[in-house]
Amino acid sequence: MIERLLVSGGVILAVAAPVAQEAAPGALSPRNASYTIAARLDPARRTIDGTERIAWRNITASATGELQFHLYWNAWRDTRSSWMRERLLAGGRDLADRPPQDRASMDISSIAVNGTTLPFTYIAPGDGNTDDRTVIRVALPAAVPPGGAADIRVTWRAHVPRTYARTGAIADYFFLAQWFPKLGVLQDTGWNCHQFHAATEFFSDFGTYDVSLTVPDGWIVGATGREQSRKANGDGTATHRYRQDDVHDFAWTTSPDYVEFRQTFRHATLPAVEMRLLLQPEHKGQEQRHFDATIAALRYYGEWYGAYPYGHVTVIDPAWQSGAGGMEYPTLFTAGSRWMAPRGVASPEGVTVHEAGHQFWYGIVANNEFEHAWLDEGFNTFSTARAIEQAFTPNYLAERYFGGFVPWVFRDIAISRATDGNRLGGYRSAARMDAQITPTFRYWPPTAGAITYNKTATWLHTLERLLGWDTLQTIMTTYFQRWAFRHPTPEDFFAVANEVSGRDLTWFFDEAVRGSHVFDYGIQLLRSEHDRERDRHDTVVAVRRYGEAIFPVDVLVTFEDGSTARERWDGRDRWTMYRYTRAAKAKQAVVDPDRVLLLDLNYTNNSRTLVPRAGEASRKWMLTWVAWAQDLLMTYGFFV
Ligand SMILES: [Zn+2]
């Protein structure tokens, strides 16, 4: 999704896991959790009645005597769920104060496994909250061995809420995600089926989804997959059947108001993608901006990491005030436009590129979002900024006034990837709040987004500057292709990074990911004195590590005759000192002159200039810093 809570604001080489050998010929994924669903929406009552049949296969090395399912919508049933408790901790009283009819529920009528109806119990594996009803366990009469299968049938009724977490309804606009009882992921260590938490998203196995959706006749439907058939039922409803292979989720939307557009993405080396856009009627005229942003993601992510393999994608423009914008689902995502979207500002393009980009980091490389949300959100925030820079430069700062209605574009402040694109300002506010490697659902809720999105993007950009883009791109391509249609962990990424770069980067991941230390290098002292006896200038430069985190840095000293001295410091001690005896007096000393270490929390101490700073040079320098600081502050404000 697009982060708004806090800073608030090739061809794929289908490298199958050994366990995937039983998958169908031509399958990209193991397809071990396939769903056939029939669901009927009653818009007046806001209910969904559903039946599902899950063909599940145990692809682990261990037998299991139980099944675990997510019932996500029960997070919005009352204020005692773990999701709601965490959201209240992060500030969100309005969500809790809603009337009962705007809340959600998911009630199971029956679960049968291999023809036997079985009882179920609610469990709370993450926090022991016995009031949470988002996970159930079903004990099996007979264990399912490795390679064994189960035929699971579930019937349920759900109440559609006023939108929570991008899911729900407003008037006759429905956006429905996490809307069916969904299996957790069985791993060699047991079931991984976390309760629904406020700061995390989802995790599930790949399969084929074959879903029949019954809605009022004449309503437009958008969904994961391609429409297979549509038939009027003669009772005022129509049933739309959608199907998709090799995905791990299914979301859909329906409304009588959508206006439909189609275009095709074409590229010299990437497969064509049919793009379907369902636009709100009042946004007619903005369709090309949605397509162009989707094309940017398909193009640059495709060129950098690997091809989008599904051949089609659906872009949803959510209804005004629906709260459903900026969220990713397989082959479908929600964008989000705004009144008077000015040219030269990458909005709505930013959100569209980001959500389209999630088709790669989330959709194809499917990490566990409960535990390591940064693996998709952070990688995608970094990739979004890079794609935006390629496709939409120049891109200017914009502010909105008069209650957010009237945009004003600051054409003298170009948005830079180093600040806006990687959200340094957003990271700074939460730098010490949690070690990034902490399971995401255990992050301090009010600052989880800052680490998940901003810190990750900033350290990836730092890695880009440390290793060079060619090396980082090769790392990310290798990681993408090796882990496509599988579930990587952070250690899997670190291993690829070390292997591909040919360097042991453990020290960097220890600092940036495994810990919560902050980086801050600065010039503590710059002194240059005239030695009359020798008619030379003695210069002393002291560089200090103010933060706990360690990173090798360059130090550049410039002298008045234009000569320079460049030093390389391993950055380990608390400080180091350099001395020079030269004809010229020193002018300036800078630590990290190339700004490799974008994680440095305080750039204002990174340079010292000997006074007096006269003339044009100092003014120019000052203006640069003022513009930079302004950019940063405004960037922060922009996302609030
Ligand atoms: Zn996202």
Image (spheres, rainbow, N blue to C red):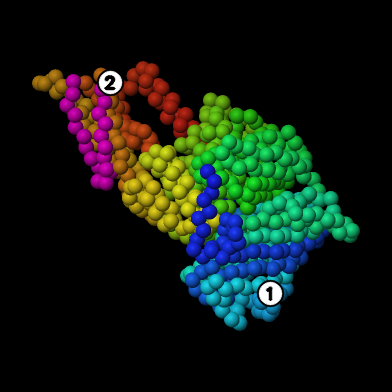
Magenta residue span: 563-583
- Residue 181 placement (x, y as % from top left): 66, 66
Q: Position of residue 25 (x, y in %)?
A: 60, 59
Total of numbered circles in the picture?
A: 2
Foreground disc of the pair 2, 1:
1
Residue 111, numbered label: 1
Q: Residue at the location (78% across, 62% down)?
A: 40
Question: For this view, does 186 lie left or right of residue 498?
Answer: right
Q: Residues within 10 Å of mark 2 (few under 14, many from 20)?
A: few
Q: Residue at x 51, y 69 (%)?
A: 60
Q: Identify the residue at horizontal 37%, vertical 50% (top origin).
A: 499
Instruction: Identify the amino acid type marked 1.
Output: Ile
User: Would residue 370 be found to the left or right of residue 209 on screen?
Assistant: left
Residue 562 got which mark? 2
Question: Position of 85 compared to 416: left or right?
Answer: right
Residue 284 image offset from top left, x and y in percent: 75, 36
Respond yes or no on whether mark 1 lies under 8 Å from ligand 1.
no
Residue most toward the bottom? 141
* Label 1 Cα neighbours within 10 Å, binned few <14 / some 14-19 / many ≥20: many
Question: Which residue is nearer to you in this view: 467 or 73?
Answer: 467
Q: Main secondary structure of the magenta part?
A: strand
Depth check, front residue: 148 or 134:
148
Mark nearer the N terminus (2 vs 1): 1
Identify residue type, mark 2: Gly
* Quadrant housing the C terminus: top right
